[in-house]
Image (cartoon, rainbow, N blue to C red):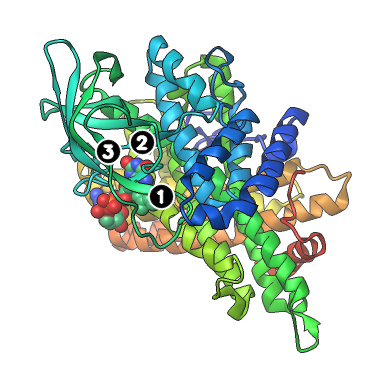
Amino acid sequence: MATQLVTEIRGGAWLLNESAEVFSPERLSEDHRMISATAHEFMTNEVLPAIDRLEQKDWALARALVAKAGALGLVGTDVPEAFGGVDLDKAASILVGEAVGRSASFATTLGAETGLAIFPLLSFGTDAQKQQYLPGLAAGQLIGAYALSESGSGSDAMAARARAVQQPDGSFVLNGEKMWITNGGFADLFIVFARVDGEHFSAFLVERGFAGVSSGKEEHKMGLHGSSTTPLVLQDARVPAGGLLGEIGKGHRVALNTLNYGRFKLAAMCSGGAKAAIAEAAAYASARKQFNQPIASFGAIQHKLGEMTARAYGVESALYRTCGLIDSSLAASHDLPGSLEEFAIEASMLKVSASEMLDYVLDENVQIHGGNGFVKDYPAERHYRDARVNRIFEGTNEINRLLVPGMLARRALRGALPLIAAAKALQDELLAPPSLPASVPDRMAAERTLVAGMKKAALAILGTAMQTYGEKMADQQEVLSFAADMITEAFIAESSLIRALQASTDDVARATLHEAAARVVIHTAAARVEASAKEALAAMTQGDMLRTLLAALRRWLKCVPADLVFARRTLAAVTVERRRYAFEIN
Ligand SMILES: Cc1cc2nc3c(=O)[nH]c(=O)nc-3n(C[C@H](O)[C@H](O)[C@H](O)COP(=O)(O)OP(=O)(O)OC[C@H]3O[C@@H](n4cnc5c(N)ncnc54)[C@H](O)[C@@H]3O)c2cc1C
């Protein structure tokens, strides 16, 4: 594969390039570590002891906690100082997101405030709107919410029916009902989407105090009982002319860009939630005895702890890599929505993989707790229920999967990514006689070959889908979902590999740990990639073409199996010894 076909600071570029370096938790600065420590202390001392009261819907307490987070600078990390924030990079926002992920309910409250209210104002607000609202939001004194969904339009959000009619004085009258609004019960400010004259999809800043604005009853949910979710009712709601956010008819830009950031932040919260659950599982497995020994001494439990750790490592590696790319893009362009749009593909991949990784980890946490995992005396069952919604909101995982190959293909067609040329080069390689693999450096040689093979396989499936279906590709959801999974697996595998190779070999124990995690991630991903590729190829091709592609697939993913039992045991041993996620930074 050609090196540096496109500059690395482009979304999707990693698929075509060979990257040597990634941003990772090991590269965080002292300032980053300090903000992470502050956020964790706040969670330990203020939020975690208050969970039962939050679950009883004590919204005054929820408000007070957001204000405390604001006073500590944890809410305004993205906000410039001129508007009352602390103006830090996205790595700082990710660290705060991971820390608050220890309580899914509070993370949802804070995520709506920072990702869904502050972000669109920052990106699309006028100076006057920013002056009016950002200082209060950044301080956590003003609570924000985001009202896009309606009972009839969730995934198809642009089909919203809420209407806005502009009045002769420039103000608007809004009518409609929004559904499932996080912070709905106590938010002061709502970013509301409605169609002007029933047509032009637009965003508005709507205060709770405006005439005609009210909240419906709290939803009875499976989990997240400590987060408010209500309808928002707009009955001839009066919004001043200055309440239009962005332009009339351009609400989709506000909505979609906000979701790009929301997905990225949600991945951070899932990553933090998984690390906390791994610590919980390790502590329980060390304390719980059966057959006169701690259950942590059993191979079956070590397998779980090792696999949970490796999967968390994979997502964490991809998350920090993306974060580094976004921060580099921001430093060069100072364009916040533009930088997030550039990495929208990665944000969707992270949202899907992080939410599914978390569900796996929390399911195994319940299993490690046995009967105690099923009763409310232990938090394992609450985490399990709370996490389920992550696969539904911020765009369902089905929709996000479809976005990944869709966005890549669109970029290829408009010439922003030379995907078609790369897929063609792969085809030429297929027709050429098999050559011996180029010699690769010794360290993790098999894993390097596998990662390169996974990228080729993902590219080949995407290229074949584009060729086979052309403009009708969007109709082939099953094949596109397989392609999305392969692309995502390759991204996570490569991020883990580069991170592990970056670990200094001077500290042998540490380097071994990184290698063990990356090895589990890469070998298990390769098996899943092969299965997805076979399904997709069989659906798209037949005869000689199918045989040629299957032979190439075998060649790309050929590898002597690694001893993953040993790798997982290595990870489990450190997790149990430290009673925490083995790669924790603080
Ligand atoms: C606790 C909670 C908090 C929320 N907070 C907010 C909030 O703050 N603000 C807000 O605006 N919304 C919020 N939502 C709403 C959430 O974003 C939607 O529920 C979500 O977008 C899915 O929409 P839906 O429920 O209408 O499902 P549907 O769109 O009806 O989807 C049902 C199923 O069909 C699939 N599907 C739909 N369309 C397609 C397609 N084209 N191709 C393939 N599969 C498809 C979906 O993936 C899903 O599996 C929240 C929801 C919950 C539960």
Q: Nearer the viewer, mark 3 or mark 1?
A: 3
Q: Amino acid at mark 2?
A: Tyr
Seen at 64% across and 48% down, the residue is 496
Camera-nearest label, 2 or 3:
3
Q: Is residue 449 left or right of residue 205?
A: right
Residue at 19% in and 48% down: 152
Tell me the number on the disc at residue 484: 1
State the image coordinates of residue 504 (x, y, percent, origin top left). 82, 42
The Cα atoms of the two marked residues, 3 and 1, are separated by 40 Å
Is residue 228 in view?
yes
Per the image, label 3 sits on a secondary structure element best described as strand
Q: Nearer the viewer, residue 370 or 439?
A: 370
Displayed quadrant of residue 139: top right
Q: Amino acid at mark 3?
A: Ser
Q: Which residue is mark 3?
A: 214
Within 8 Å: ligand 1 and the Cβ of disc 2? Answer: yes
